[in-house]
Image: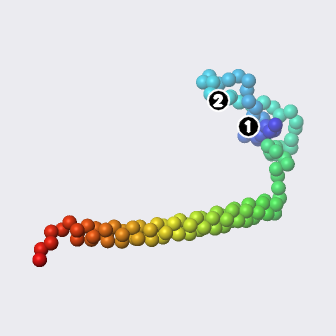
Amino acid sequence: MQKPIMAVTGDETDEETELAPSHISATTGDMPTYQIRAPTTALPQGVVMAASPGSLHSPQQLAEEATRKRELRLMKNREAAKECRRRKKEYVKCLESRVAVLEVQNKKLIEELETLKDIYSPKTD
């Protein structure tokens, strides 16, 4: 369960308040309403409670995590690019093979057409 977020108000008392979902539904029924209530524990003035204290990291840890994520992304991208190039080569080979077959077929059809022209064309001597 996520802890509520604490906020510091700009009132004259500078007292900390907590936003909590209200059990009273909004008039539209679509969005929950929030009530402002006093905190259950006292924090020093100006301190804001984080949603999950375990998620705080040092700048070095954040930089290492960012570097690790970048390296992982680059590695995945390299693999995807390699696979894309492989598929493209395969596609080009298929196209070249199809061109060769169609050229042979076209040549045969041209020869057949010439033969038929010779047979059925009127011969004038």
Give the number of the disc on residue 112: none
Residue 37 pos. (x, y %) = 78, 30
Image quarter in which the N terminus is found: top right
Q: Position of residue 24 (x, y in %)?
A: 70, 22
What residue is drawn where x is 48% and y is 70%? Answer: 96
Disc 2 secondary structure class: loop
| 30 sits to left or right of 35 | left
Helix, strand or loop at label 1? It is loop
Looking at this view, name the residue that lies furthest to the right: 41
Q: Is residue 29 left or right of residue 119?
A: right
**According to the image, label 1 marks what residue?**
11
Q: Visible in this render: residue 59?
A: no
4 relative to 106, above or below:
above
Q: Quadrant of residue 39?
A: top right
Q: Quadrant of residue 45?
A: top right
Q: Can you name the residue that lies furthest to the left here?
A: 125
Identify the coloring.
rainbow
On the image, the x and y values in percent for residue 38 come to: 81, 32
Foreground: disc 2 or disc 1: 2
The residue depicted at 60 percent of the width and 24 percent of the height is 28
Observer able to see residue 115: yes
Q: Establish if 18 lies above or below 95.
A: above
| Pick the front one: 108 or 76 | 108
Mark 2 belongs to which amino acid?
Answer: Met
Residue furthest bottom as drawn: 125
CB under 8 Å between discs 2 and 1: no
The first of marks 2 and 1 along the sequence is 1
Which residue, given by chain and number where applicable, does mark 2 sit on? Answer: 31
- Lateral position of residue 113 relative to residue 98, left or right: left
Q: Quadrant of the C terminus?
A: bottom left
Q: Decide: is 27 above or below 113.
A: above
